[in-house]
Image (cartoon, helix red, strand yellow):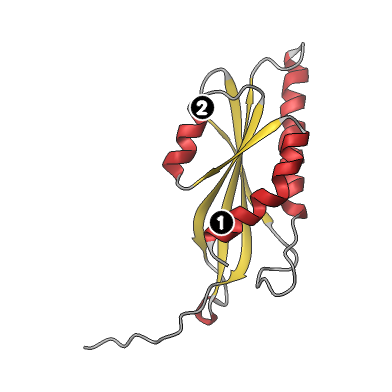
Amino acid sequence: MTSASLLTAMAAAIRPRVLAASGGLELAESLEEARDFLASAPSRWRMVLLWDGYGSHPAAREGMASHQVTAVIQQVRGLGSERSAKLLTFSDRIEQVSGWIRALRFPDGSEADPYGFSLTDSRWLETVKTARAHALSFSLATALPAFSETIPISL
């Protein structure tokens, strides 16, 4: 599974839920593009999905890898009437997005871990002062696309 096919599949599965929750979804092709999205406050809330690269896998020699994906939840400050209510609203949104991603399952034959994503990290981010942001990092074990040739090295 390639990084592009992974993010495309994730977006297709999650986008209806994000839209139903009055949010927006952006796919970032790079860390720089993700930062560009986060440089301005959303009108309500948004999720930015980013492929962070490959992580280690115990069967790496056999063509396995771990896709590292980050979902950033960004929400405008000021939702709700009290500070505690605003924080609870944003905390609920973080849990909601975490649940959506952990609930994703890939079909048989996709060469992805049938148990789906593992939550590996969670952290607050500094973005614009009018919004708060939190990043959730996930890992998914998958088989890498095989090469059809062997490339010899000359010494």
Q: Say if 60 sits above or below 81 in the image.
A: below
Q: In this rendering, would 147 be left or right of 42?
A: left
The kind of residue tagged 2 is Thr
Q: Which residue is mark 2?
A: 127
Q: In percent of the image, x 58 and y 47: which residue is there?
A: 70
Q: Nearer the viewer, residue 88 or 76?
A: 76
Mark 2 surroundings within 10 Å by alpha-carbon count, few (fewer than 14), some (14 through 19), many (20 or more): some
Tag 2's secondary structure?
loop
Q: Say if 19 sits above or below 115 in the image.
A: above
- Give whichever of discs 1 and 2 has the lower sequence position: 1
Q: Quadrant of residue 132?
A: top right
User: Residue 34: x and y, percent?
Assistant: 49, 39
User: Residue 26: x and y, percent?
Assistant: 58, 39
Any mark on residue 68, and which? 1
For the residues marked 1 and 2, what is the alpha-carbon distance in whole angstroms?
Answer: 22 Å
Any mark on residue 89, and which? none
The kind of residue tagged 1 is Gln
View extreme (top): residue: 81
User: Residue 37: x and y, percent?
Assistant: 50, 33
Q: Quadrant of residue 95?
A: top right
Q: Say if 13 sits above or below 91 in the image.
A: below
Q: In this rendering, would 54 be left or right of 138?
A: left
Mark 1 surroundings within 10 Å by alpha-carbon count, few (fewer than 14), some (14 through 19), many (20 or more): many
- Looking at the rendering, in which quadrant would you find the C terminus? bottom left
Tag 1's secondary structure?
strand
- Looking at the rendering, in which quadrant would you find the N terminus? bottom right
Q: Say if 131 sits above or below 145 in the image.
A: above
Q: In percent of the image, x 77 and y 11: which residue is there?
A: 81
Q: In this rendering, would 150 be left or right of 22?
A: left
Q: In percent of the image, x 53 and y 52: which residue is there?
A: 51
